[in-house]
């Protein structure tokens, strides 16, 4: 039904949330799919920052990591950095 309907007329001010309030009752399955997709949080953290050890390794969010797992993660990061630099790991 969604694909068979025409396009929404262009307007300068368009609120997608208002559109979903109305269209969600008309397209309940599409509404569920959109809710699942739009519920995924967007990250603004660069990948380098996500894997950086310049800050704390353990925090209240990472307190369940065992000492062995912290060592594995740090060694893996070091190996990957050296591999990217073209250095050979022995």
Image (cartoon, helix red, strand yellow):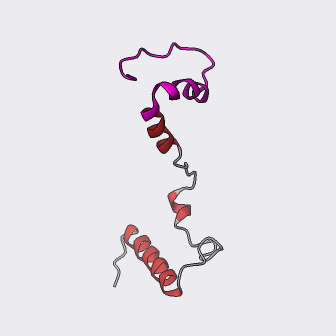
Residue in front for this viewpoint, 58 or 29: 29
Up-down relation of residue 41 to residue 5 (above or below): below
Label tally: 0
Q: In the drawing, does residue 79 fall left or right of residue 63?
A: left
Image: 53 above or below 21: below
Q: Quadrant of the C terminus?
A: bottom left
Nearer to us in this view, 58 or 86? 58
Q: Which residues are magenta?
A: 1-29
Name the outermost residue toward the right: 60
| In magenta stretch: residue 24 | yes
**Quadrant of residue 60 in the image?**
bottom right
Quadrant location of the N terminus in the rendered image: top left
Residue drawn at x 55%, y 68% is 52
Place of residue 9 in the rendered image (x, y in percent of width and height, measured from the top left): 51, 13
**Image location (x, y in percent) of residue 50:** 54, 63
27 and 72: which is toward the camera: 27
> Residue drawn 51% across and 81% down?
70
Indicate whether 69 appears above or below 4.
below
Image coords of residue 79 (percent x, y): 41, 76
Instruction: Assess whether residue 74 is covered by the magenta stretch.
Output: no
Lateral position of residue 53 relative to residue 81, left or right: right
Residue 47 appears at what percent x and percent y? Answer: 50, 59
Identify which residue is drawn at 49% across, 78% down.
74
Q: Residue at x 48, y 24 (%)?
A: 26
């Amino acid at each position: 039904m969604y694909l068979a309907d025409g396009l929404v007329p262009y307007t300068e001010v368009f609120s997608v949330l208002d559109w979903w309030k109305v269209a969600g009752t008309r397209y309940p399955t599409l509404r569920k799919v959109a809710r699942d997709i739009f519920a995924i949080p967007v990250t603004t953290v660069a990948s380098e920052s996500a894997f950086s050890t310049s800050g704390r390794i353990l925090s209240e969010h990472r307190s369940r990591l065992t000492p062995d797992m912290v060592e594995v993660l740090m060694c893996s990061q070091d190996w990957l950095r050296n591999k990217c630099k073209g250095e050979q790991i022995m």
